């Protein structure tokens, strides 16, 4: 095992990784920008290095600055967290060239899965179900219209690089398709550095399910169960729960087997997740993408398995055996993302946090990136904390969730806590009969 690790991320996820590193006896090194100097994760680190101004491109996404910080601190490893750098194959290669242990999958696996079109082709060849869509980048809006006619409306239009819902839009006809194409191309160029776009068939009323995997050094891929990520706003997940209330055992087993096959196909090592779009009526699913990083929803899986997934990342990266025997989940967990944003329009907010009072009690976990007195700036993603609850079953977890959301008090910038309270009472969520359209029904477009 390496003796020290530099965490190349910020906020909640940086603090979470640093805590496991320290618990394992590793020297925990943080990097931070000018804007984050007073955040809790900086104080939690054994050593912290200022790497630049607030602008992410000059700090957290500045690869030379991060590698220099690793050199200055004699770090033995780099953990990129759960953001864009985690899917940067170039950084993974450069770390290895500098004799730094990369806490993540091999660079080739990152590169192959970071290209959504390439990943679709690989999964299809491996026998993993893949939805209707294109098999090469769509070069212009006219070609997009032709392809959409072949695939059949509605279609998803999204960047071919990266993961998540960045730049994703749904088109129901040719005019909306042309608009969605330009939006996706601009987002792809701005965020990922090139404007390649793909199209896939959109399934109304679908579920978004991700399977947690861990690739071991001997080539074995282990599945830890699934998380239902269907509660989303602007195609970004805000609630994740495990097990999904919408899957029957046979469908779940098929999805877990497909996720293992996907990991084996690319020689996956370390923690990642395989995401699927599920048609609950047809009981069919299709591969969406593979996230080659620590998934942000890992908290739910940790709460039901009792396994520290970051510890397993460190162990696999160091070539050590994992520290668990049985990955089977027990009980039910729900994780809410608490954002600094308006609870109706979901517009990000900022300002000083005047009051921060966390809920406490059995089955409650808070992974926070801020504290009382911290300042939320408009520069970064508005995630304040992850609120996790666990119960013996879903009804037990929901009861604890309602109490925990009610008890979480944050004053200063606006937060989405009122929305989460509203969600608790929504019949579709209360019964578990929800899909990716739930938030849109709660907040219809004006």
Image (cartoon, grey):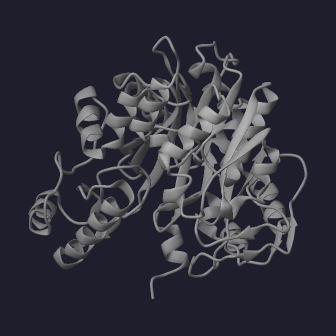
Q: Specify whether 93 is left or right of 214.
A: left
Q: Specify whether 339 is left or right of 147.
A: right
- Screen quadrant of the N terminus: top right
The answer to whether residue 365 is visible is: no
- The location of residue 398, given as percent across then percent down, is 75, 56
> Is residue 287 shown above or below 22?
below
> Is residue 94 shown above or below 389?
above
Q: Specify whether 424 is left or right of 211.
A: right
Frontmost residue, 266 versus 432 = 266
Residue at image coords 67%, 72%: 416
- The location of residue 111, given as percent across then percent down, is 34, 36
- Screen quadrant of the C terminus: bottom left
Q: Determine the image quadrant of residue 262.
A: top left
The answer to whether residue 95 is visible is: yes
Q: Determine the image quadrant of residue 45.
A: top right
Q: Residue furthest front?
A: 72
Give the total number of marks visible in the rendering: 0
- The location of residue 100, given as percent across then percent down, is 55, 25
Residue at image coords 72%, 71%: 417
Frontmost residue, 135 versus 188 = 188
Q: Specify whether 399 is left or right of 315.
A: right
Frontmost residue, 91 versus 393 = 91
Frontmost residue, 169 versus 61 = 61
Residue at image coords 84%, 69%: 373
Q: Residue furthest bottom?
A: 446
> Is residue 32 shown above or below 421?
above
- The location of residue 365, given as percent across then percent down, is 80, 48
Residue at image coords 75%, 70%: 375
């Amino acid at each position: 095992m390496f003796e020290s690790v530099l965490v190349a991320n910020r906020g909640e996820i940086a603090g979470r990784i640093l805590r496991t590193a320290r618990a394992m006896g590793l020297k925990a090194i943080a990097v931070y920008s000018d804007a984050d100097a007073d955040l809790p994760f900086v104080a939690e680190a054994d050593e912290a290095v200022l790497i630049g101004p607030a602008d992410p491109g000059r700090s957290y996404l500045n690869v030379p600055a991060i590698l220099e910080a690793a050199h200055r601190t004699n770090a033995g490893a780099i953990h990129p967290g759960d953001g864009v750098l985690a899917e940067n194959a170039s950084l993974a290669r450069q770390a290895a060239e500098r004799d730094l242990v990369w806490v993540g999958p091999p660079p080739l696996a990152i590169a192959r899965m970071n290209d959504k079109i390439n990943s679709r082709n690989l999964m299809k060849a491996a026998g993993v179900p893949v939805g209707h869509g294109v098999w090469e980048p769509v070069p212009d809006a006219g070609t997009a219209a032709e392809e959409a006619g072949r695939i059949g409306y509605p279609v998803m239009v999204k960047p071919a690089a990266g993961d998540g819902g960045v730049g994703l839009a749904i088109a129901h006809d040719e005019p909306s398709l042309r608009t969605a194409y330009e939006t996706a191309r601009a987002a792809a160029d701005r965020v990922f550095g090139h404007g390649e776009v793909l199209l896939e068939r959109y399934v109304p009323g679908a579920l978004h399910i991700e399977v947690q995997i861990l690739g071991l050094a001997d080539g074995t891929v282990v599945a830890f169960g699934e998380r239902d990520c269907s509660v989303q706003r602007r195609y970004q997940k805000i609630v994740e729960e495990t097990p999904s209330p919408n899957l029957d055992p046979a469908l779940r087993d098929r999805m877990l087997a497909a996720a293992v096959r996907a990991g084996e196909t690319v020689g996956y090592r370390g923690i990642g997740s395989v995401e699927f779009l599920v048609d609950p009526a047809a009981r069919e699913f299709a591969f969406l993408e593979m996230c080659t990083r620590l998934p942000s929803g890992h908290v739910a899986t940790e709460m039901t398995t009792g396994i520290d997934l970051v510890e397993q990342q460190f162990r696999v990266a160091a070539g050590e055996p994992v520290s668990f025997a049985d990955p089977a989940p027990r009980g039910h967990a729900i994780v809410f993302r608490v954002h600094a944003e308006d609870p109706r329009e979901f517009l990000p907010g900022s300002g000083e946090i005047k009051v921060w009072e966390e809920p406490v009690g059995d089955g409650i976990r808070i992974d926070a990136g801020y504290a009382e007195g911290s300042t939320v700036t408009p520069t970064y993603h508005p995630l304040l904390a992850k609120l996790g609850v666990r119960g013996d079953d879903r009804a037990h977890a929901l009861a604890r969730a309602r109490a925990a959301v009610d008890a979480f008090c944050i004053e200063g910038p606006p937060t989405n806590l009122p929305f989460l309270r509203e969600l608790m009472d929504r019949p579709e969520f209360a019964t578990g009969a929800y899909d990716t359209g739930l938030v849109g029904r709660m907040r219809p477009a004006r």
